[in-house]
């Protein structure tokens, strides 16, 4: 028996909100990851089985290694189809916002969603949820939004409506947000849920292969280059930093998702507990931070890079040059020595 995490009054509010409408839209954060796509597609499959006809809109492209996910061909990408998506946001009657806490995480899609007259339902596991949603299912102790979607569907009495496609999407989100169950994954109930998903027919080994063993040769060479030539270690702070410029990324034919997982790699070095990866983008530096134990990656990100996230996995941005972002990082690293 899986415990009841989501409050009872929230369950009935969501049920009533779904029952009351025909036009439902599901949105996620910019740069959607496995949990964003997993949770939105799982909800989409579920809503299809109860004869709603929802639409998923993502702010920017999802990575290629998720393109096998069932239902993903239906997903609209806001940056590629702005007019059509704006029209949907004007007419939709209910919006689920999944896997992010504050509207700015939708980047250029933020205004269209927030200005939509439709009520919003937040389902998320990040700290500090914003107050834009009429119904907020926010449980930071849960390791993925996809797990919350499973719990939500079950609590609405619809476990039997979880088909194999829905189960695969839930599993993908649970797996990717825990690095293949290597962090944030000590809660026993995660495995009770996986037990149910496997009984529904999920082939977990196949999903692992499709997500983690599905990269291009260029991406593998980029990893080699980054680790060999671009990784800087700060032994006194048990920290590693990797930076990649646009020019370097272009040399390796960088595609969306190609840098996925790179930030985790230095954590496998004995003694390294904090790893940071800065990637130059067309208009900003995207920063990923990962830590082990009690070292607060999210605090560093919030303090230095307008970001946030989880204790061990956080992200942020810098609108300066790479050199300035690196200097800011190095100048402030000593402030976090007490967390080591
Ligand atoms: P990633 O490094 O995979 O892009 O992000 C890791 C986690 O950090 C995400 O799950 C999200 O919680 C958080 N995150 C990433 N980018 C940002 C950002 O720009 N702002 C905030 N507040 N959180 C972010
Ligand atoms: Mn997530």
Image (tube, rainbow, N blue to C red):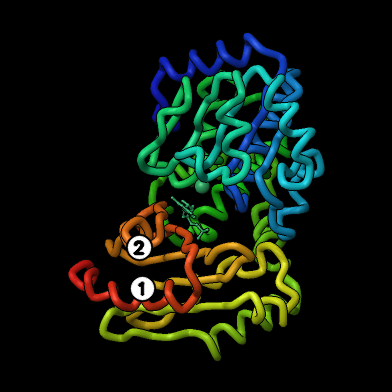
Mark 2, residues whose alpha carbon is within 10 Å: few (<14), some, or many (≥20)?
some
Residue 324 point in image, percent of width and height: 43, 75
Query: What's the mark number on residue 30?
Result: none
* Circles 1 and 2 in contact, beta carbons < 8 Å: yes
Give the residue at x 63% y 44%. Answer: 38
Going by the picture, which residue comes out furthest to the left?
338
Query: What's the mark number on residue 329?
Result: 1
Give the residue at x 29% y 77%. Answer: 331
State whether residue 151 is above or below residue 53: below
> Nearest the camera: 129 or 303?
303
Instruction: Decide if ligand 1 comes within 8 Å of the CB at mark 2.
Output: no
Give the residue at x 72% y 46%. Answer: 79
Q: Is residue 116 left or right of residue 187?
A: right
> Nearest the camera: 215 or 151?
215
SS state under label 2: helix
How far apart in space, not on screen, are marks 1 and 2 (Cα)?
7 Å
Q: Is residue 241 left or right of residue 15?
A: left
For the C terminus, the image quarter is bottom left
Give the residue at x 50% y 38%. Answer: 103
Residue 328 point in image, percent of width and height: 35, 73
Q: Is residue 71 shown to the viewer in this render?
A: no
Mark 1, residues whose alpha carbon is within 10 Å: few (<14), some, or many (≥20)?
some
Q: Quadrant of residue 240?
A: bottom left
Query: What's the mark number on residue 304?
Result: 2
Residue 263 point in image, percent of width and height: 50, 71
Instruction: Decide if ligand 1 comes within 8 Å of the CB at mark 1.
Output: no
State whether residue 226 is above or below residue 66: below
């Amino acid at each position: 028996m899986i415990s009841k995490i989501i409050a009872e009054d929230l369950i009935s509010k969501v049920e009533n909100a779904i029952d009351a409408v025909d036009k439902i839209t599901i949105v996620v954060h910019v740069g959607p990851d496995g949990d964003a796509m997993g949770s939105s597609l799982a909800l989409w499959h579920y809503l299809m089985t109860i004869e709603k006809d929802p639409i998923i809109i993502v702010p920017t492209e999802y990575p290629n290694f998720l393109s096998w996910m069932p239902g993903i061909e239906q997903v609209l990408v806001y940056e590629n189809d702005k007019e059509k998506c704006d029209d949907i946001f004007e007419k939709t009657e209910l919006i689920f916002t999944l896997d992010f806490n504050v509207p700015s995480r939708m980047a250029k899609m933020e205004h269209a969603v927030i200005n939509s007259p439709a009520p919003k339902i937040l389902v998320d596991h990040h700290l500090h949820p914003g107050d834009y949603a009429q119904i907020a299912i926010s449980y930071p102790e849960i390791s993925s939004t996809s797990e919350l979607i499973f719990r939500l569907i079950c609590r609405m009495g619809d476990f039997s409506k979880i088909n194999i496609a829905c189960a695969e999407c839930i599993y993908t989100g649970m797996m990717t947000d825990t690095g293949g169950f290597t962090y944030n994954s000590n809660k026993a109930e995660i495995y009770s849920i996986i037990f149910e998903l496997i009984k529904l027919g999920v082939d977990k080994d196949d999903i692992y292969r499709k997500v983690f063993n599905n990269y291009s040769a260029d991406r593998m060479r980029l990893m080699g280059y980054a680790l060999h030539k671009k990784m800087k270690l700060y032994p006194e702070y048990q920290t590693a930093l990797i930076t990649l410029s646009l020019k370097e990324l272009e040399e390796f034919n960088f595609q969306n998702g190609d840098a996925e997982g790179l930030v985790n790699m230095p954590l496998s070095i004995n003694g390294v507990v904090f790893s940071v990866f800065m990637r130059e983008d067309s208009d900003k530096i995207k920063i990923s931070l990962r830590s082990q134990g009690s070292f607060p990656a999210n605090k560093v990100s919030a303090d230095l890079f307008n970001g946030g996230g989880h204790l061990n996995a956080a992200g942020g941005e810098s609108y300066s040059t790479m050199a300035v972002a690196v200097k800011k990082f190095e100048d402030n690293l000593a402030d976090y020595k007490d967390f080591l």
